Image (cartoon, grey):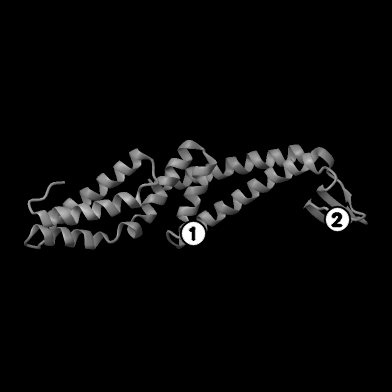
Amino acid sequence: MQFTTPEAQKVFKQYLKRLEQSVSRLPESMQQDLVKEITGHILDSMNASQKETELDQLLDATARLGEPAKFLKPMIADYETEYATSTFNPVHVFRAMVNNIGAGFLRTVRFGVFFLLYFTLFTFAFLFISKIFFPDQTGLFFQNGTFYGFGVIFSAGNGTEVLGYWILPLSLLGLVLDYLLITFLLKLTVIKRK
């Protein structure tokens, strides 16, 4: 974007720098798309502005948008969610969840649920690994016919572990189903946004 006055060019470069910093953790193609979209909004806003000077039009346009770190938070969260669901990478999915928490009340609730689903996913993985390394301390424990505990219990006392090695395929099944549910729900979230 070229401006006729050096003051407007300087203001725009400073704003563009803050904009680029705000989107820097996104993949390069998404960064370019988002910066292009925002600069298009600035140009449209300047063209519709009633201000007389180019600098005043630019300042008015950027003031309406606000600080990039704030107004871009939901957009970045959307882009990260879209990217995470296209890659199926758990690290990207987790990052998308974290960035959606705090980007509005409904997003926080929705992605808080995703966070809990991920917690159960890691719990299944932990149980699977724990059963391999601590077979006598991992499982579903009963003592005198009543429930005693579930998970990794190092002081089971007189408790009896009732699942045995069945906890391995059950944990693996829970892990796969939980991951598929998270991915499906994230895809619904992205589809709903479009």
Residue at 82% across, 38% down: 165
First along the sequence among labels 1 and 2: 1
Q: Residues within 10 Å of mark 2 (few under 14, many from 20)?
A: few
How far from the left and from the top, in percent, is residue 72? 34, 55
Q: What type is the residue that disc 2 sits on?
A: Ser
Q: Which mark is residue 155?
A: 2
Task: Identify residue for label 1.
Answer: 108
Quarter of the image where the C terminus is located: top left
- Viewed as shown, does residue 21 lie left or right of 40? right
Quick one: 117 or 152, which is closer to the camera? 152
Mark 2 element type: loop
Q: What type is the residue that disc 1 sits on?
A: Thr
Residue 116 figure quarter: bottom right
- Compared to residue 151, the image places residue 83 above or below, namely above
Residue at 38% across, 40% down: 27
Q: Residues within 10 Å of mark 1 (few under 14, many from 20)?
A: some
How far from the left and from the top, in percent, is residue 5? 8, 54
